[in-house]
Amino acid sequence: MTGFLQTLDPIFEHCAEHIMNELFDTPPERRHTDSIKWRRYQDSDVLPLWVADMDFAAPPPVLEALQTRLQHPVFGYADPWPSLNEAVVEGIARDHNWQIEADWIVWLPGVVPGFNLACRLAGDPGAGVLAFPPVYPPMLHAAANNDRRLVRSDLVETDNRWGIDWDHLAALDHKAIRMLLLCNPHNPVGRVWTQEELVRLARYAEHNDWLICSDDIHCGLVLNPATPYRPIASLDESLAQRTITLMAPSKTWNIPALQAAFAIIPNAQLRQQYQHAALGLVASPNVLGLVAAEAAYRHGDTWRQAMLEYLRGNASLLAQSVNNIPGLRTTPIEATYLAWINCKELGQTHPQRFFEQAGVGLSNGKDFGLEGYVRLNFGCSRALLSEALQRMHRAITQS
């Protein structure tokens, strides 16, 4: 299997940044394709900035690896191969300063089945699963999907920054909670949890014997160098033994439909229980997704760094524009390509619908557990983002 990647052209490692920026400025046309993001509004003049799916073409090394694999005409069953796991181990050490072992990796078709599986290991039916809304909508439903109970501790905004409500967390019935479901970096508020915050959460988990499942799918998308990402499992060995960390190349390298993700589970017994819970329920990842994953982790960092720089420009434009639109406000975005926008001062009962009627398709904050907000995906060309922001401004000033 490794032979499929040995023919990759090393020129991609040295792709000029200015050439890549031109690619980001002129992404492929997605109208009238199989894209759910663009098909939602294909018959109307609405710019789709909703689902977390960037418009940028996948990295050249990933496309090359897929083309190489397609030269072999057989697509039989395949297990993850050693060089794939080695690429993940090396990539996580390089990008996140966390040394894992290949044996800790459990491959999955996505992080959503990953944290749903984790809920099945959280105590007995009816046990509490703690989450911090507003949060990625499937995380709000994972507990009920698996006969557990969601325990909410809503984030609070203080001094223009979202954070954990430590007083509320302290007042919860900690013994009724059996798992902490974390999102780091956090979708949709764009926070990267600090080491101090992670340590405080870890103390709760260790004192109350909680399992931890951390969805870290956006870990490769840190925009602010002053807020580096750290996996909670990397804090110490004892904490790692109670933690399931979920990652995937899908968001970072924009290959979500290739269906390849993984759990990192250092505890051998917990890993065995997790794999057993998946039997008959969770499919193996797509073989092309695995090929793409190896190429991304081995050869995709030049593209990633150029993409991050482009996203930083988009984030700056967005923050300046949104915070100058009457009735809207957003907080600094530390990671992800998603902006969480406060619309409460607009006086609109349904802000998502209001902006949709103005030609901008956004995600509804209610789906994340908090009304009066919208989420905007700025993983698009700067021209498209500028047009969307202008439409939002006109909608408000002319209403």
Image (tube, grey):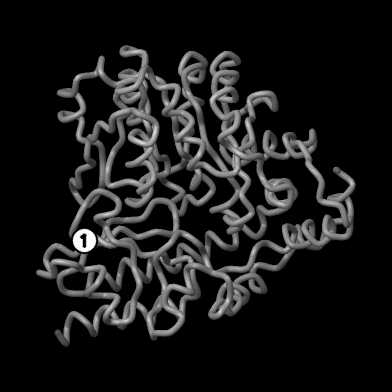
> Along the line of sight, which residue is nearer the eye, 390 or 121?
121
As helix, strand or loop, the secondary structure at mark 1 comes to: strand
Position of 15 compared to 96: left or right? right
* Mark 1, other Cα within 10 Å: few <14 / some 14–19 / many ≥20: many
> Along the line of sight, which residue is nearer the eye, 211 or 34?
34
Q: Quadrant of residue 283?
A: top right
The image shows residue 306 at horizontal and vertical percentages of 60, 62
Q: Where 119 sits versus 253, above or below?
A: above
The image shows residue 104 at horizontal and vertical percentages of 63, 25
Q: Where 163 sits versus 324, above or below?
A: above
Position of the C terminus, as image quadrant, is: bottom left
Count of marks overlaid on the render: 1
The image shows residue 202 at horizontal and vertical percentages of 37, 22
Q: Amino acid at mark 1?
A: Asn
Q: Residue at x 18, y 80 (%)?
A: 396
Q: Label 1 belongs to which residue?
A: 342
Seen from this angle, which residue lies furthest front?
A: 280
Q: Residue at x 70, y 27 (%)?
A: 102
Q: Quadrant of residue 9?
A: bottom right
Position of 295 compared to 255: left or right? right
Position of the N terminus, as image quadrant, is: top right
Q: Where 267 sits versus 335, above or below?
A: above
Q: Residue at x 15, y 70 (%)?
A: 327
Position of 40 compared to 34: left or right? left
> Along the line of sight, which residue is nearer the eye, 375 or 143?
143
The image shows residue 307 at horizontal and vertical percentages of 57, 62
